[in-house]
Image (cartoon, grey):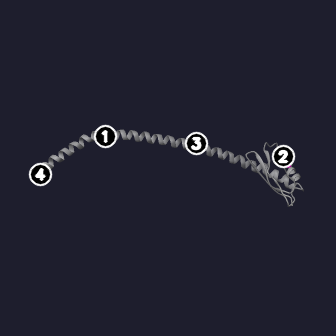
Amino acid sequence: MLRGFSLSACLILIGAGLAGCSNTEKGLEQDTAKNSQTVSQAADKTAMTTEQAAQNAAQQTKESARNAAEAMGVTPKVKLAITVDKELKDSRNNIDVDTKDGVVHLTGVVYSDALKQKAEDIAKKTLTDMNATEKISNELTVKTQ
């Protein structure tokens, strides 16, 4: 009797399992469809993010190249023009020239207001002679002895 009961219990479980298979199969199809949609959305988002990152990198590369070209072309010529001047090359002066984003920055120390103005004037003349479009930012500090 126990054996007959076990066999009946097994048949009931197998029947329930078979009945559940059709539900499981439909559920699996639905889950697969949802997962496919989620993966597709994630792929689209990743593609957009990657494209934006590539555009940002390209823009930064262009800006870096432009800044490098400015630094190689304008900066040394302005620096040379300033250091050739007898008054400005005095050891009490320390003038640095950098070019970035279309602006020539004059930084450092000079020992008079007149020399600060002279450095700016020389930089402007150098840019004019080169037909350059950069602006001048005179950030020199006047430090008396």
Amino acid marked by disc 1: Glu
Q: Sort mark 2 into few (<14), some (14-19) or many (20+) by Cα contacts within 10 Å.
A: some
Q: Of marks 4 and 1, which one's residue comes earlier in the chain?
A: 4
Q: Magenta residues?
A: 122-126
Q: Which mark is residue 124?
A: 2
Instruction: Kindly report which numbered mark, 4 or 1, lies closer to the viewer in this rendering.
Output: 4
Q: Of marks 1 and 2, which one's residue comes earlier in the chain?
A: 1
Q: Number of numbered discs present?
A: 4
Q: Quadrant of residue 89?
A: bottom right
| Contact check, label 4 and label 3, Cβ < 8 Å | no
Find disc 4 in the rendering and name its residue: 2
Amino acid marked by disc 4: Leu
Label 4 to label 3, Cα distance in Å? Answer: 71 Å
Residue found at the far right of this picture: 86
Residue 73 in the magenta stretch? The answer is: no
Q: Which of 130/141 is in front? A: 141
- Could you tell me which residue is drawn at 44 percent across and 41 percent down? 38
Label 1 to label 2, Cα distance in Å? Answer: 79 Å
Q: Which mark is residue 37?
A: none
Find disc 1 in the rendering and name its residue: 25
Q: Is residue 10 left or right of residue 113?
A: left
Find disc 3 in the rendering and name its residue: 52
- Could you tell me which residue is drawn at 44 percent across and 42 percent down? 39
Q: Assign the magenta stretch its main secondary structure.
A: helix
